Amino acid sequence: MVGRRFCRAFVSVSLISWTISVAGCASSNFVMLRDIPANPLSVPLELFSRNGPEPTERTFQLLRRYDLKKQFQETPQEATDRLQRLAQEDPSAEKMYALAELAYINGQKAAQSADMSTALDRYGESATNAYTYLLDARFDWERNPYDPQFRRACDLYNGALEQVLRILKKIGELRPGSTCVVETKQQTFDVSVVMRGAWHEEDFGDFEFVSDYRVEGLKNHYRTYGLGVPLIAIRKSHPDQEPHEKYYPSGLVFPVTALLRVMPQENQVAGGRRRCVLELHDPLVSSSIRVANRLVPLETDLSTPLGYFLEQPLFKGKELATQGLLHPGPAQKIRGLYMLEPYDPQKIPVVMVHGLWSSPLTWMEMFNDLRGLPEVRNHYQFWFYLYPTGQPFWISATQFREDLMDNRSALDPQRQNSVLDKMVLVGHSMGGLVSKMQAIDSQEDFWKIVSQQPFDELTATAEVRESLKKTFFFQANPSIQRVITIATPHRGSNFSNGRTQLLSRWLIDMPRKLVGARDQVLKDNPELIADRRLFLIDTSIESLAPESPVLPVMLNAALAPWVKHHNIVGLVSHEAGETGVKERLVSRVSERIVGDDVGEGDGIVEFANAHLENVSSEIVVDADHTGVHRHPRSILEVRRILMDHLKETGHSDKSLIPPSQVPVRLEPDFSKSVIRALPPL
């Protein structure tokens, strides 16, 4: 009984140690729901003040000039209508801006009174007048992009359109592929919802508004400023999915920007109804579009939708990583490649492979930063490999090899897409070993670890023989051109010692079928298998020991001639500071398990074991094992490598948007219309 209690205490301390030392602490929340949606108009229009909402002083100045201020304070809508008539008689940019501001305020008041029909009309009027101020060629000589009013006009368009979308969502009309009829006091409109991206109409199940959420768990927030409403589009599964859609995880979301175009008068439909097009744009395809015969930047947000997705159960917290470590057998059900953005056959895949007791969650900081750079996202797409980390890394490498082959067969069965032959692998810690094994030929070297006799003489069932053959004999994947390893124990780690190996055997529940097959092979081949060490390694912890027989063979194996290898090494500074403090805390918790065997390095992998000669590049980053792949220098290094990869492969010269995906130009004709002819939506 005492021994059992001791073992349980030993396991508890060790779990704490591993969580801090190996896996790191995941953020509990990536986004938080705001009490009040973010709105850049809140301050200038005093939306939430006791006396608000109120126009800005410049709008009040215009009202005073036309003797409308008192009337606005008494009857706001009548004053707005009078200013509208003045604008029709003598159009000007300042009148358009004031009308947009006043209509927005009137919409706010109508919404507060639960008069949603009037609110819809006023918000639409605000968006229309802001649109006119920003894009009507008649006001080119007046507009000043350096004037703060110009940006507020963008905010008015975006804010008013967002309120329109909220109303459409509430009544169930915000659905791609649909056309809804919107009636206001001025006119009736047919609003078509169309997609401008590599999506299907049935992909979108629901929408959330980016402004409702605050990013918490990602250090950097990537957004661009322009026109449109950033949305979180929640994907739903649907029948007749294309082959690549099986790689989308459940609960996947897409970043989307909604923009409303007003069609020319001649495009009106039967009954005199005016046609509008609500476009849903993919900011990963383009961050600017043609509107009113000019290039207009889109308002986009890539980080908030990512944070929203990371709140979903699949990648949330440590549960997934722990399942893969302690129960490799059941975890095979969710093993595989995952795509977190729409598949693009013209973008080079970057496959990110996590390490021990981890999951794709560990890559989100780097993914967010890399995707936030236009020069990266315009040419690359990011995939993530999830695998059980409790099994020896060479088993994971074998499975990864098969999963990559299946992926290519699904996406490009005829192997005609040369872009897929420019793949880049990025592996952290043990994931670096799993990745490197995709770029080498085994020849006879790995089989010679266990036997000097031909493999054909092995006695085993057909199933076991085939499994062992895939593990010991393989070729470099011809689609992989670069491998980036980060904090990888190329020569093993002293973190794997007698104590942690014993612990891993206690904790990790290897599949009985696998263990039984191994034991049977050893029993049936006593003469053929001269070195039993590799067969007796059951867990990933044991496979990472410096004396692991596979590591020297990997070090001596030459990478395929078409592959370039880059290495990033962590080296913890022992000086005072945040990193040093963290290392000392880790050491205190880990001391009873790891001991003093781990020398100079990142706290888990010694520098000498992570360092490599004869690689295309190597840098040393002042970071511990859990932070090296999140460190800005590492992310910048990966960016540099990816940019070099574009130049060397010639991919940067290629057009990335196929003709079928180029947005159709649907532009309003301002020259033939007066102000009120522009619809309120």
Image: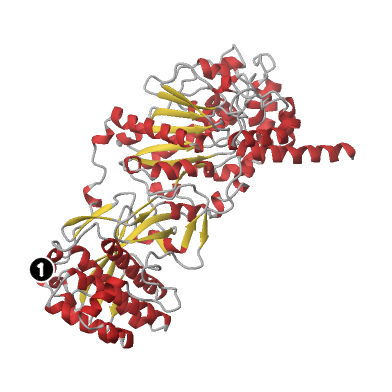
Residue 419: quarter of image = top left
Q: Residue at the spot x=44%, y=55% of the render? A: 305
Question: Where does the image place residue 568, in percent across and percent down from the top left?
Answer: 48, 27
Residue 540: quarter of image = top right
Question: Where does the image place residue 534, in percent across and percent down from the top left?
Answer: 64, 22
| Nearer the observer, 266 or 680 | 680
Residue 31 sits above or below residue 584 on the image: below
Q: Residues within 10 Å of mark 1 (few under 14, many from 20)?
A: few
Describe the colour scheme in one phrase: secondary structure
Q: Residue at the spot x=38%, y=30% of the render? A: 641
Residue 524 sits above or below residue 190 on the image: above
Name the amino acid, label 1. Ser
Circle 1 is placed at which residue position?
671
| Nearer the observer, 99 or 240 | 99
Can residue 376 be seen? Answer: yes
Side of 173 where 147 appears, left or right = left
| Nearer the observer, 264 or 374 | 374
**Label 1 SS:** helix
Can residue 177 be seen? Answer: no
Q: Residue furthest right?
A: 1
The N terminus - image quarter: top right
